[in-house]
Image (cartoon, coloured by chain):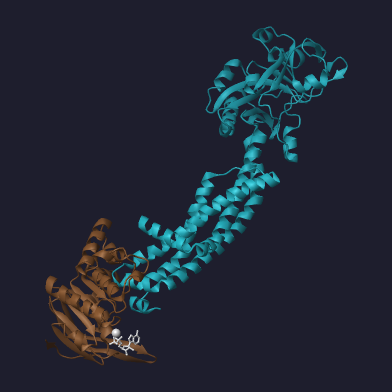
Chain colours: A brown, B cyan
């Protein structure tokens, strides 16, 4: 078991009242799982993903990742967890515009304290894995949306994290590049046994995953094996 | 760290105009300070050189009573003071900071000294064989004193070039006879002080410092002094120090040593003329006037610092998404803080460097136009650059902390 969540709740203050966005979410993910989380817009998918990705903390509940109690971690420890154990792919890529593809991919390794030569070598390998070996010196504005997202995926996997998270990774892409990206996740799952949690509201996309869970109004329903 | 600096430099370069405008306050402040400091230092060095006489490093040690020179023209030699011997003189030369010592007698305002019917007005000295070397005189015409002049108590005299002009108008003084206290003395030579350039007179103080100094002097052998004045007179001591900075120290050493062996009186004591102290008093006077200006310049630095803070805050806002992403992929808060601190420090250090450059240029321009002396102080320049860096760190702190505390989720959503 790589990830275990119990009774996770998340409240957001709304004026004088609070809104509960996540309601007693329970989730376990095993090593090598490929899980899709589906749900309509505003159902709390991103909120859940941010908590899984240690970008946000739950209001209550327990969360352990790779045996570590995340709710007890300091900000510094959380940064290390994000750096070493989680790879995050965002809907809108979030590449740094002034850096080349290679430099973007190597960035997490810099924060891990790795030497430059090794950083660049691993980044190059990761770009090769996502099929962009010939684009390493391009800046984001010289790449298509699909290529940008693949650079972002390379950045997410370069540090060989335990867990790969993707929040609507195809949301900003046309269907052709979307399909390419989904293929890439499939390949990462099959070839290197990566553990993947992907958010989508597209059932067609969710079909790629091994299993699917649905979230509605902050309530995560039981799993469906595909 | 080096990577951070080079990234920061790239950042500065990619916003050239904005960076320059941000640095302007620092540039102006540092330039003003460097200009002021260079001018103060230049003035101080000029004062020091003027007062002390370039390179001579001679300090006079003489008898004083109640802080004033004990003047043998008006009073008898004081009780409880023994004249110094040649052995004592050579012992004094071994003291710390002392290079050479001369014992001599002096009448500041001579009376009864005539050449023909012309009355000489100036100083009369009874000197030893070290006097001219200590005070850096050379013989221009005729000869200097030789050993037999001293040992045989010869009535011979040397005149300085001023006296040669004023007392012997046009005549060659060598071979002439002057009358001192009724005794005839034969002039054997003309001497003058080395170092060529006369003192630069800038102020009334300067004038008083130099009035009567070195001008119109007649020298006779010290051994002959008793022929015209008293035989038991205690000497004055001219001490050539090893360096200008050692003058005070050497003078004090000699005065203390003499007081221990040759003075039993409580009232009169040997004391060193503290030219260095007089110089530094004068320096303090000019410096304190100028250092007020430094405070005004410092205000400009604070204003510059606030400008830097402002632009750094703008930069943090502009780069919110970048910061959010970095935090999301695991950058520690401390790293984000350092990134912005480095940027601010690089920006202000660069401003400091430019300011130092402008300041040096301005100081020389000022000296060209207004004739103020200039001396560039390396340490002041270094301090200025380091200080600008500190300004960057101080005023960059708030923006850097703000950046490091950003919530990554909100930061990534930022447009
Ligand atoms: N920072 C926040 N403050 C207040 N409400 C929020 C905040 N973030 C999300 N929400 C609310 O939480 C709910 C779930 O949002 P989100 O997790 O982004 O949904 P999804 O990703 O499924 O579209 C929405 O109703 C949204 O308005
Ligand atoms: Mg969402």
- Tell me what residue is drawn at x 24 percent, y 64 percent: A133
Q: Quadrant of the N terminus of chain A?
A: bottom left
Residue most toward the right?
A: B117
Q: Residue at x 55, y 44 (%)?
A: B377
Is residue B335 left or right of B134 when viewed as pictured? left
Position in image of residue B60 (x %, y %): 65, 28
Quarter of image, res B399: bottom left
Residue B217 in view in this figure:
no
Instruction: Give above or below for A169 relative to B88.
Output: below
Q: Quadrant of the C terminus of chain A?
A: bottom left
| Above or below: residue B54 compared with residue B295 | above
Q: Residue at x 19, y 84 (%)?
A: A36
Where on the image, by quarter, is ligand 2?
bottom left
Asked if B380 appears above or below A164 in the picture, the reply is above
* Rendered image quadrant of residue B410: bottom left
The percent coordinates of residue A80 (x first, y second) are 25, 68
Residue B324 seen by the camera: yes
Q: Tally the numbered discs.
A: 0
Give the x, y percent position of residue A217: 26, 93
Residue located at (38% from left, 65% from top): B337
Residue A205 or residue B107, whichever sits in front: A205
In-front residue for pair A169/B125: A169
Q: Quadrant of residue B117?
A: top right
């Amino acid at each position: 078991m790589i990830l275990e969540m119990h009774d996770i709740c998340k409240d957001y203050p709304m004026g004088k009242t609070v809104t509960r966005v996540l309601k007693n979410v329970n989730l376990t993910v095993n090593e090598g799982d490929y899980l899709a989380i589906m749900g309509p817009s505003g159902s709390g998918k991103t909120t859940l993903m941010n908590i899984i990705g240690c970008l946000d903390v739950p209001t209550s509940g327990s969360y352990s990742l790779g045996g570590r109690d995340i709710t007890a971690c300091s900000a510094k420890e959380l940064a290390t967890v994000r750096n070493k154990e989680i790879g995050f792919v965002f809907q809108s890529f979030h590449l740094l515009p002034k850096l080349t593809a290679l430099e973007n991919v190597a960035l997490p390794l810099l924060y891990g304290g790795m030497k430059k030569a090794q950083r660049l070598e691993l980044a190059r390998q990761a770009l090769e894995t996502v099929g962009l070996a010939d684009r390493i010196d391009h800046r984001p504005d010289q790449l298509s949306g699909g290529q940008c997202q693949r650079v972002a995926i390379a950045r997410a996997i370069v540090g060989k994290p335990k867990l790969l998270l993707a929040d609507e990774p195809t949301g900003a892409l046309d269907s052709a590049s979307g399909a390419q990206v989904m293929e890439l996740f499939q390949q990462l799952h099959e070839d290197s046994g990566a553990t993947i949690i992907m958010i989508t509201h597209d059932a067609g996309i969710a079909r790629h995953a091994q299993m699917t869970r649905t979230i509605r109004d902050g309530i995560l329903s039981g799993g469906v094996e595909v | 760290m080096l990577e951070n600096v080079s990234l920061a430099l790239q950042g500065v370069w990619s916003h050239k105009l904005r960076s320059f405008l941000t640095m302007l306050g620092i540039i102006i402040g540092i330039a003003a300070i460097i200009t002021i400091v260079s001018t103060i230092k230049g003035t101080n060095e000029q004062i020091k050189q003027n007062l002390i006489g370039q390179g001579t490093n001679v300090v006079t040690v003489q008898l004083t009573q109640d802080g004033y020179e004990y003047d043998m023209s008006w009073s008898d030699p004081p009780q409880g003071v023994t004249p110094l011997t040649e052995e004592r003189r050579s012992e004094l030369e071994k003291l710390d900071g002392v290079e050479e010592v001369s014992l001599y007698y002096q009448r500041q305002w001579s009376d009864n000294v005539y050449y023909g019917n012309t009355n000489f007005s100036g100083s009369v000295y009874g000197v030893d064989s070290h006097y001219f070397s200590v005070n850096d005189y050379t013989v221009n015409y005729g000869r200097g004193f030789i050993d037999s002049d001293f040992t045989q108590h010869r009535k011979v005299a040397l005149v300085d070039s001023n006296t040669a002009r004023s007392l012997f108008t046009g005549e060659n003084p060598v071979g002439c006879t002057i009358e001192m206290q009724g005794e005839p003395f034969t002039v054997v030579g003309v001497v003058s002080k080395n170092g060529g350039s006369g003192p630069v007179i800038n102020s009334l103080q300067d004038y008083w410092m130099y009035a009567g100094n070195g001008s119109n002097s007649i020298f006779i052998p010290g051994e002959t002094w008793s022929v015209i004045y008293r035989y038991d007179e205690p000497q004055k001591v001219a001490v050539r120090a090893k360096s200008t900075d050692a003058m005070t120290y050497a003078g004090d050493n000699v005065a203390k040593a003499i007081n221990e062996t040759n003075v039993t009186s409580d009232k009169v004591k040997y004391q060193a003329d503290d030219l260095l102290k007089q110089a530094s008093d004068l320096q303090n006077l000019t410096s304190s006037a100028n250092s007020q200006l430094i405070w005004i310049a410092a205000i400009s630095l604070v204003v510059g610092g606030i400008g830097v803070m402002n632009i750094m805050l703008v930069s943090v806002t502009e780069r919110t998404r970048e910061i959010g992403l970095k935090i999301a992929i695991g950058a520690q808060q401390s790293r984000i803080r350092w990134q912005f601190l480095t940027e601010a420090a690089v920006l202000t250090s660069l401003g400091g460097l430019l300011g130092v450059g402008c300041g040096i240029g301005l100081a020389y321009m000022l000296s060209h136009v207004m004739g103020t002396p200039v001396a560039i102080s390396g340490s002041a320049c270094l301090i200025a650059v380091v200080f600008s860096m500190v300004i960057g760190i101080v005023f960059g702190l708030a923006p850097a902390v703000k950046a490091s505390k950003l919530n990554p989720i909100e930061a990534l959503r930022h447009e």
